[in-house]
């Protein structure tokens, strides 16, 4: 199913908010951006399209924001974690997802823990800017 523009989006390890900003230009409006770095968040906060968003400085290995989400994106976030740490974060994420929620990640290497919770819609190694990346998009089981 298509994600409604009213859908709640969680941008994990949002960095400077590139992905949320991109989604905002597509008409999505409800964003929660979380990152460990206050400097990155400052840059994200300065983006006009994201001015109504919720910004949270936190370590995702320790805490995840409250709320119920329809889409969770993580770009180059889970790279920094091994399969076990990633699995731990994802398992805590599940209670914060609406039914039919979509989970999307882009990272360097394939992880298997996503399939435990999500039915793959798309899973592949793709070439991004001359580098091979792992892309997983799945729907909550």
Image (spheres, rainbow, N blue to C red):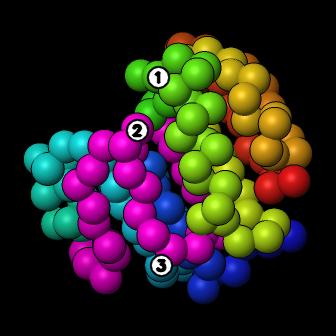
Q: Position of residue 76 (x, y in %)?
A: 46, 31
Looking at the rendered structure, the secondary structure element under dot 2 is loop
Q: Residues within 10 Å of mark 2 (few under 14, many from 20)?
A: few
Q: Residues within 10 Å of mark 3 (few under 14, many from 20)?
A: many
Q: Position of residue 135 (x, y in %)?
A: 68, 32
Residue 128 counted in the magenta span: no
Q: Nearer the viewer, mark 1 or mark 3?
A: 1
Which span is picked out in magenta?
Answer: 48-75
Q: Position of residue 55 (x, y in %)?
A: 28, 66
The answer to which image quadrant residue 86 occupies is top right
| Residue 50 image label | none
Distance of label 1 from label 3 (alpha carbons)? 27 Å
Q: Are marks 2 and 1 in contact (CB under 8 Å)?
A: yes
Viewer-nearest residue: 120 or 4: 120
Q: Earlier in the sequence, mark 2 or mark 1?
A: 2
Q: Quadrant of the N terminus?
A: bottom right
Q: Nearer the viewer, mark 2 or mark 1?
A: 2
Residue 21 in the figure: left or right of residue 8: left
Where is mark 3, residue-wise?
A: 30
- What residue appears at the point 38 percent right and 51 percent down from the top-left corner? 63
| Residue 81 image label | 1
- What residue appears at the point 81 percent right and 46 percent down from the top-left corner? 118
Residue 124 in the figure: left or right of residue 74: right
- What residue appears at the point 53 percent right and 67 percent down from the top-left corner? 9
Where is mark 2, residue-wise?
A: 61
Viewer-nearest residue: 136 or 35: 35
Eyeballing the image, is 115 above or below 6? above
């Amino acid at each position: 199913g298509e994600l409604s523009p009213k859908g709640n989006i969680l941008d994990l390890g949002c960095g400077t908010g590139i992905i949320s900003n991109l989604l905002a230009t597509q008409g999505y409006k409800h964003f929660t951006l979380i990152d460990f770095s206050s400097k990155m968040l400052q840059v994200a906060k300065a983006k006009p399209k994201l001015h109504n968003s919720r910004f949270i400085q936190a370590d995702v290995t320790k805490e995840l924001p409250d709320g119920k989400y329809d889409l969770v994106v993580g770009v180059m976030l889970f790279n920094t974690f091994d399969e076990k740490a990633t699995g731990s974060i994802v398992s805590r994420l599940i209670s914060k997802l609406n039914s039919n929620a979509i989970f999307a990640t882009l990272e360097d290497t394939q992880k298997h823990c996503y399939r435990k919770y999500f039915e793959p819609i798309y899973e592949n190694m793709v070439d991004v800017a001359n580098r091979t990346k792992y892309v997983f998009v799945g729907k909550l089981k």
